[in-house]
Each structure stands twice: as C-alpha cells, then as structure tokens.
Image: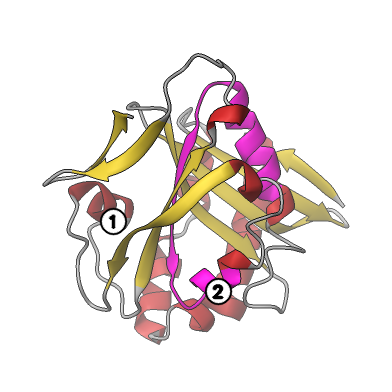
Amino acid sequence: MTIKLLNVYDSKLYFEHLVRVFNTKGLHTIPDREEIEKMTSDLSQEKINKLFLNNNQKVWGKFNNGIITNSVRTRMFDYENTVFIANYKSENIEIFNPIKHILPLLEEAFSYYENIGYYNFIIIRPTKLFSLRKYKSIEDMSPLNRYNSYYDEIIPPNKFSEFSMYRELLWNRIYPIELGVVSMSLKQEYRKYGDKKNITYTRTDDKPMLIDT
C-alpha cells in the first residue's frame, strides 16, 4: 500500500477510480439514480486532467496493486488559510470506515497544508455518513486529534445552504439528502508560529469568517 500526492500522470488512474466508486457506491450517498447519472456524465478524462493543472487543487491517492483504491481531493482558498476537503472516495465495501481507509490520506493532506500554513478545513458530507457519534469514535486519532471540529451548518434535503460559500462548494445544487458542513481548526499548540493568535469560525450574513479571539 502506497499513499502519494497525485500529479497529471496519475490522472487516468484517478479517473478510473472515480468511475468505479460512482458505479459501485453511488447509491449509498445519493439515492436518486438520476443524480448519479448527472454526476457521472459530468465526469470526463479531460476535466480530470485540468484538475491536476489547477494549483489550488490537490489529490492524494492510496495505491493497491497499481490502482487507486482510496482518494482525498482538496481545494485551497485565498482567505484565512482555509482548505476545502472536496471529497474522499473509497472503493472498500464499508460505507464509512475512515479509521482503516481515509485517515491515512487525511494525515498526508493535513500535514502538507499545515507545513505551508493552512490551518483550517471544511468538509461537507451526508450526516448519516459523518454523524457526531461516528466522529466521536475517531476524534482522538491523528490527524483529527490536532483539530477543534464542529458542525457549522446542517443543510436539509432539497434545500440550498444559507451561505454563498457553501452553495458554491456544492456547485449551487440541491441534494436529496441531509448534509453537514464540518469546520475544523488546528489547535494552537500545533500551529507553526507559537505567537500567532488563535482563530475560530463565526458566521456573517453571507459566509463563515475567521476572527481573532
């Protein structure tokens, strides 16, 4: 098993990985077959190639026998050192097993961004897959144990987010399932600069912001 930061030369393997995930596991997270067809129709090798040429997006993959079986894709934001965990995909049978399959990828991704001063992360997932109970079972494991985490918004089925930032991250679309926006901020003791002020999320009328505390 090998984990690496993917590049354009891995784009074909990554594309094949995403197609396998959609074809075998899509119904677990998006119960509407039409939704799956829309998402797979938007998926193309050309778009995947462009993803790897975008410096604001990074993808980590776990290889097994020469194919990618698990992945984490991220997107950096220009304000307040924030990274969006765009998605994480696993071809394993378990619907939600981050301990075994996802946490090693998150460790690589979080460590990469921490080293360049990005200390805040956002994850948007179906609440049934990222419930508080399930999160509590893994929050003491690395890298999650380095972060303060909480739900910033619960988006009801077939509703838009209240915040433009999250609407953009969700492609300005509604989904037939309940979604949770999880905000994560690196604890003070793990930050590279010891005299840097602690920062936490708060909301404004339009989008979450970071403020000094």
* Mark 2 burial class by Cα count in 10 Å: few <14, some 14-19, many 20+: few
What residue is drawn where x is 53% and y is 41%? 49
Element type where label 1 sits in the image: loop
121 vs 111, left or right, is left
User: Could you say which quadrant of the image residue 197 lies in?
Assistant: top left
| Residue at mark 1 | 171
Of the pair 6 and 128, the residue shown nearer to us: 128
123 vs 38, left or right, is right
Q: Kindly report the distance in space between the C-alpha atoms of the residues bearing marks 2 and 1.
A: 28 Å
Q: Amino acid at mark 1?
A: Trp
Question: Which region shows up in magenta?
Answer: 105-134
* Mark 1 burial class by Cα count in 10 Å: few <14, some 14-19, many 20+: few
Camera sees residue 150: yes
User: Is the residue under label 1 in contact with that under label 2 (CB below 8 Å)?
Assistant: no
The spot of residue 203 in percent (x, y) is 22, 46
Camera sees residue 130: no
What residue is drawn where x is 68% and y is 58%? 102
- Asked whether 108 falls inside the magenta stretch, the response is yes
| Residue at mark 2 | 133
What residue is drawn where x is 45% and y is 39%? 75
